[in-house]
Image (tube, rainbow, N blue to C red):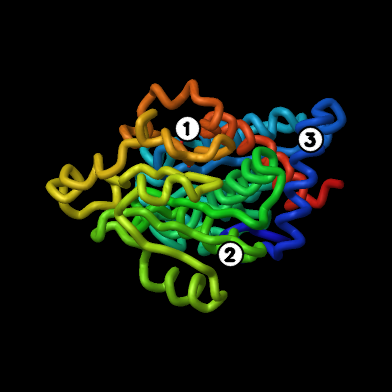
């Protein structure tokens, strides 16, 4: 039985296969509309979510399956003190596949050890969010038509942003990828990403606090939100939250085919005036998330 807890659980061939299937689903939606008839997905969300939970649910409905679950721990027996292990053991008797988001790093891994059905990590603390990474890869493939030979700027909260860590780990597998890591000093990438991924794989990267300086070089600009929920101190959050606000002026020297991405939710880091720019891909990105999750559900359920 396969689970998806960390993007590292998937080989590059498996990732590429999911992207091919997702692109086929986009082109041939009707062909997939009954693939999961009689199957159920359970979405166990101990932390808020709009895109991840609802795109998983939409994915299962579009595959002809059904959905159950909870969207906050307060509406389940977790509020009475039930453990993740017991919850998952019980739910794996009700559903064919489980999606779990939890504020504690490692909780989905624990869930996978207790579950009788495949478990998907939908985000665990500041650690991992593998289906968001698959979403980014499908977006890049669809919008840039390649996953190689790209200069990727990642801007904002590189310390707590779980999507950033998984994205760097995933893109580091492809040829001729360069990273420009743009953040205030306090929100730089963790040292293990620098040493264990970038340096170990001889990836070219630059660390800077100057977005405008590197803008003309970028093929992709991945903006991120400063993660209020991960800060220990409200004062630090307030000081850092508006470090980068992408607006039309900052895009003046950008490439014509720049792809602007953001995992969403956005707070202030992309001005709404950018939404009409044809290089803005973040709402399309959220939609691609549904298709890659459809491909993943089929794969983990062993449905061709
Ligand atoms: N990108 C993302 O994970 O969004 P949600 O928190 O709304 O699921």
Rendering quarter of residue 278: top right
- Horizontal side of residue 290 vs 279, given as left or right: right
Q: CA distance from mark 3 to mark 2?
A: 26 Å
Q: Nearer the viewer, mark 2 or mark 1?
A: 2
Q: Can you give x and y, in whole percent of width and height, for residue 125 in the image?
A: 39, 54
Q: Label 1 crowding class (10 Å Cα cut-off): few <14, some 14-19, many 20+?
A: few
Task: Identify the residue shown where x is 66% and y is 64%.
Answer: 175
User: Is residue 96 at all visible to an observer of this figure?
Assistant: no
Secondary-structure class at tag 1: loop
Q: Can you give x and y, in whole percent of width and height, for residue 154 in the image?
A: 44, 51
Q: Can you give x and y, in whole percent of width and height, for residue 173 in the image?
A: 63, 65
Task: Identify the residue shown where x is 39% and y is 52%.
Answer: 161
Q: Quadrant of the N terminus?
A: bottom right
Decide if ligand 1 comes within 8 Å of the CB at mark 3.
no
Q: Are marks 3 and 2 in contact (CB under 8 Å)?
A: no
Viewer-nearest residue: 241 or 50: 241
Q: CA distance from mark 2 to mark 1?
A: 28 Å
Residue 165: give its label.
none
Q: Residue tagged by mark 2? A: 172
Pointer 2 or 1: first along the chain: 1
Task: Identify the residue shown where x is 80% and y is 33%.
Answer: 37
Q: Label 2 crowding class (10 Å Cα cut-off): few <14, some 14-19, many 20+?
A: many
Q: Residue tagged by mark 1? A: 50
Secondary-structure class at tag 3: helix
């Amino acid at each position: 039985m396969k689970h998806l807890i960390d993007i590292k659980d998937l080989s590059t061939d498996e990732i590429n296969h999911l992207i091919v299937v997702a692109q086929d689903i986009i082109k041939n939606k009707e062909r997939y509309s009954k693939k999961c008839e009689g199957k159920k997905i359970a979405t166990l969300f101990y932390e808020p979510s709009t895109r991840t939970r609802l795109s998983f649910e939409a994915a299962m409905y579009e595959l002809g399956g059904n959905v159950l679950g909870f969207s906050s721990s307060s509406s389940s027996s977790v509020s009475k003190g039930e453990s993740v292990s017991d919850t998952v053991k019980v739910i794996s008797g009700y559903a064919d596949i489980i999606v779990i988001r939890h504020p504690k790093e490692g909780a989905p891994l624990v869930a996978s050890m207790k579950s009788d059905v495949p478990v998907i990590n939908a985000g665990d603390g500041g650690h991992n969010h593998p289906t968001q990474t698959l979403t980014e890869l499908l977006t890049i493939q669809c919008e840039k038509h390649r996953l190689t030979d790209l200069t990727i700027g990642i801007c904002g909260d590189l310390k707590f942003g779980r999507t950033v860590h998984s994205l760097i780990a995933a893109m580091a597998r492809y040829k001729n990828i360069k990273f420009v890591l743009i953040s205030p000093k306090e929100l730089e990438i963790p040292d293990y990403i620098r040493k264990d991924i970038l340096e170990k794989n001889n990836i070219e990267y630059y660390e800077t606090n100057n977005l405008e300086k590197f803008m003309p070089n970028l093929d992709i600009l991945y903006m991120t939100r400063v993660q209020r929920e991960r800060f220990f101190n409200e004062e630090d959050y307030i000081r850092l939250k508006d470090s980068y606000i992408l607006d039309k002026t900052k895009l003046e020297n950008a490439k014509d085919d720049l792809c602007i991405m953001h995992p969403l939710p956005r707070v202030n880091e992309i001005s709404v005036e950018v939404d009409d720019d044809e290089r803005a891909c973040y709402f399309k990105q959220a939609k691609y998330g549904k298709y890659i999750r459809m491909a993943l559900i089929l794969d983990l359920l062993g449905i061709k």
